[in-house]
Image (cartoon, rainbow, N blue to C red):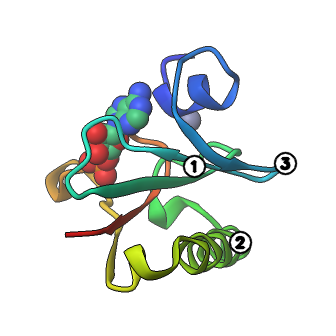
Amino acid sequence: MNCMFCRIILGEAPAKVYYQDDDVIVFFDRAPLTPIHLLVCPKTHYNNFMDAPQEVHQMLVRTVKRVITELGEKAKDFRIMINNGPRSGQTVFHLHYHIMAGK
Ligand code: AMP
Ligand code: ZN
């Protein structure tokens, strides 16, 4: 298994996990670009945004909204980012939504 995020999901690589259930894991980016920088990943491996079916994105967006709501005031203003493909800057080829917030 050479997917870093699958290794995190399987508990084979460390991560600071914020939330997980059967379908999704949310953990802190190890090189945060903002004070709060979380990655929201489906537990099923998809290489990128375009590979994943609509239902997976619905589940991920639900999770993104829930996490942002939970974070409250400190994530009042935020950015959601998805890189798709190496020329976009994607470096980990397991679908993930970035949540970036804080000053
Ligand atoms: P992207 O450039 O959209 O593929 O984003 C990949 C993100 O994953 C980057 O912001 C990295 O800092 C982050 N990252 C890579 N490996 C790990 C890891 N083992 N634990 C946490 N974050 C990671
Ligand atoms: Zn993976």
Q: Amino acid at mark 2?
A: Met
Q: Is mark 1 within 8 Å of ligand 2?
A: yes
Q: Amino acid at mark 3?
A: Asp
How many angstroms separate mark 2 from mark 1 (CA)? Answer: 14 Å
* Front position in the image: 81 or 35: 35
Q: Position of residue 6 (x, y in %)?
A: 60, 30
Q: Are marks 3 and 2 in contact (CB under 8 Å)?
A: no
Residue ID for mark 3: 22
Q: How many marks?
A: 3
Q: Compared to 82, does 8 lie above or below?
A: above
Q: Residues within 10 Å of mark 1 (few under 14, many from 20)?
A: some
Residue ID for mark 2: 59
Task: Give the label on residue 46, or none.
Answer: 1
Q: Which residue is located at x 71 percent, y 71 percent?
A: 59
Q: Is residue 91 shown to the viewer in this render?
A: no
Horizontal arrangement in the rendering, residue 87 relative to residue 37 (left or right): left
Horizontal arrangement in the rendering, residue 20 relative to residue 17 (left or right): right
Q: Compared to 46, does 59 lie above or below?
A: below
Q: Which residue is located at x 59 percent, y 69 percent?
A: 67
Nearest to N terminus: mark 3 or mark 2: 3
Residue at the limit of the structure toward the front, as seen here: 73
Residue at the limit of the structure toward the bottom, as seen here: 76
Quadrant in the picture for residue 92: top left
Q: Position of residue 9 (x, y in %)?
A: 66, 32
Q: Position of residue 66 (x, y in %)?
A: 65, 76
Q: Residues within 10 Å of mark 2 (few under 14, many from 20)?
A: few
Q: Is mark 2 within 8 Å of ligand 2?
A: no
Quadrant in the picture for residue 76: bottom left
Nearest to N terminus: mark 1 or mark 3: 3
How many angstroms separate mark 3 from mark 2 (CA)? Answer: 11 Å
How many angstroms separate mark 1 from mark 3 (CA)? Answer: 16 Å
* Front position in the image: 20 or 49: 20
